[in-house]
Image: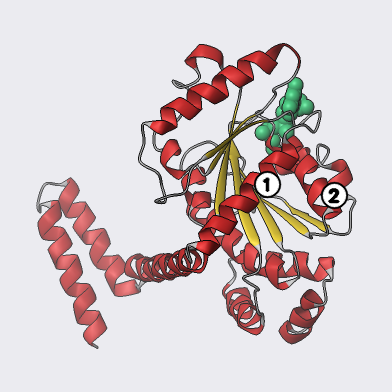
Amino acid sequence: MTVEELAKELTSGNRRALAKAITLVESTKSADKSKANKLLSLLQASRDTIRVGISGVPGVGKSTFIESLGNLLIGKGHKVAVLAVDPSSPTTGGSILGDKTRMETLSSKKEAFIRPSPTSGTLGGVAKKTREAMMLCEAAGYDVILVETVGVGQSEFEVASMVDCFLVMMLPGGGDSLQGIKRGILEITDILVVNKADGDQKKLAEQARSEYQNAFHLLSPKIEGVEVAFQTTSALEGRGISETWDAVESFVNILKEKTLFNKLRDEQDINWFKRLTEDALIERLWNEAEQKNLAHDLMNKIRKNEISPSAAAAMMAAKVNDNNGK
Ligand SMILES: Nc1nc2c(ncn2[C@@H]2O[C@H](COP(=O)(O)OP(=O)(O)O)[C@@H](O)[C@H]2O)c(=O)[nH]1
Ligand SMILES: [Mg+2]
């Protein structure tokens, strides 16, 4: 299939073409990279979509929540794509594989597309593919993109920087719930959900929610005039899901009213462009033959205390400048 044919199939909503296209952009082969770029240039990704990041520790109920939310959204006439960013399982293809059993009804629906985490190494790599995958899903007509990510390492910050609305799921932790919250997370949260508000834990969940709410009052808002929403849910029993979606929609509507929605996406695109450019330059920096040799020599000298790191860096930079002048 040519890239043009793939683009056409994808735009017509063919899910297999979409899956194939994502595999293409995930590929690290250089022939595939140029095909992938061509494909992306042929596609028109709509901005009339909602991108939601869903984060939380493993076991908090993200996949169960997405199953419930996804079905609700399909009922409302949306087409839903679920992508996973899980740096903790680079070789198994992400925990979402196991999660597919938790998304059984959703994964069987033709209005849903579920994609496990890409297998490529580093987090930056994983998240990079996720941005491209998101665009492909949008070009294929999916208008709600849910990105599931584990609350481990940098992944949630990466995901927060590529979505319109960032939802953080918490367990009903009782009195010490605030200690469990990760540094920096409060600042990137748009909606906070305390899940598993059922059975014995219902009261605890309510209590945790109000504790979080109080803690957030002490912070200046992420966006002026936009308040964080707080919700308790039982993903298992399907309660609070609809209210949570209402909160997402009203968050997005406020962004649009304030003409921040497009600005936010523009900024994200520009930051992404910078990141990709930097990555490409760094790749060249360490891999171009002459520079590689010099770097190797300098590292040996540093080990033997024959040169200081800063002097070595100056020499390296001079070499790069020379090469660029050629
Ligand atoms: N009691 C209760 N259990 C839940 C709820 N949501 C998820 N679970 C259970 O918690 C476990 C982890 O759920 P999962 O969706 O895989 O969590 P994830 O790792 O965050 O994706 C599963 O056994 C779920 O059945 C909930 O709202 N209430
Ligand atoms: Mg999961």
In this rendering, the answer to whether 73 lies above or below 240 is below
Q: Which residue is mark 1?
A: 246
In this rendering, the answer to whether 122 lies above or below 174 is below
Location of ligand 1 given as a quarter of the image: top right
Left or right placement of residue 111 versus residue 307 in this view: right
Question: Does residue 263 appear in this view?
Answer: yes
Q: Secondary structure at mark 2?
A: helix
Q: Quadrant of the C terminus?
A: bottom left
Question: What is the x, y in percent for residue 273?
Answer: 43, 71
| Farthest residue, direction bottom | 326
Left or right placement of residue 184 versus residue 108 in this view: left
Left or right placement of residue 104 versus residue 284 in this view: right
Q: Secondary structure at mark 1?
A: helix
What amino acid type is highlighted by mark number 1? Asp
Question: What is the x, y in percent for residue 127?
Answer: 54, 55
Q: Quadrant of the N terminus?
A: bottom right
Which of the labelled discs sits on residue 79, or is there none?
none
Q: Which residue is mark 2?
A: 107
Question: What is the x, y in percent for residue 100?
Answer: 80, 42
